[in-house]
Image (spheres, rainbow, N blue to C red):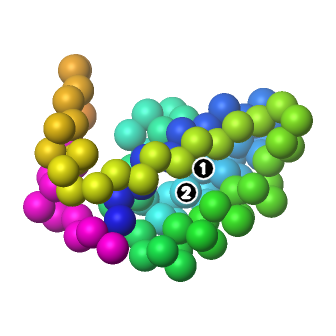
Amino acid sequence: MFCLVCFDIVDDKVRYKAAKVLKGYGYRVQKSVFECPELTEKQYLKLKDRLENLIDATEDSVRYYRQCRACLGEFEFSGIGEAPSADEYGIL
């Protein structure tokens, strides 16, 4: 599956750790946004668990946007960067 992960984390150290975790699953496209293009369901649940154990749920947030192939085909952006290719990602 393709998953877009966005976060707003107050503490610098926790934010750094969250980014480090996410780099193991995908790549950074903006300062607090990662694209995780090839996750299995098991990897997705592990990623989510790892991030939930890092953050302070009273002041931080992490959002997970799971995308299907059709949704990736409708992706739009402006400025620098590259659009993810719907052909590269499978559907689970």
Q: Quick one: label 1, few (<14), some, or many (20+) residues within 10 Å?
A: some
**The N terminus lies in which quarter of the figure?**
bottom left
Report the residue marked by disc 1.
Answer: 19
In the rendered structure, the answer to whether residue 60 lies left or right of residue 43 reads: right
Q: Main secondary structure of the magenta part?
A: loop
| Residue 82 makes an appearance in the image | no
Q: Quick one: label 2, few (<14), some, or many (20+) residues within 10 Å?
A: many
SS at circle 2: helix
Report the residue marked by disc 2.
Answer: 22
In the rendered structure, the answer to whether residue 34 lies left or right of residue 32 reads: left
**Which residue is drawn at the image coordinates 54% and 39% (left, top)?**
6
Task: Specify whether residue 15 is painted magenta.
Answer: no
Quadrant in which residue 87 is drawn: bottom left
Residue 79, position in %: x, y?
Answer: 22, 20
Q: Amino acid at mark 2?
A: Leu
Going by the picture, which residue comes out furthest to the top?
79
Q: Amino acid at mark 1?
A: Ala
The reply to whether dot 2 and dot 1 touch (C-beta < 8 Å) is yes
Residue 46: assigned label? none
Quadrant in which residue 74 is drawn: top left
Q: Is residue 48 above or below residue 84?
A: below
What residue span does the magenta drawing correspond to?
A: 82-92
SS at circle 1: helix
Quadrant in which residue 40 is drawn: bottom left
Residue 62, position in %: x, y?
Answer: 64, 42
| Residue 71 makes an appearance in the image | yes
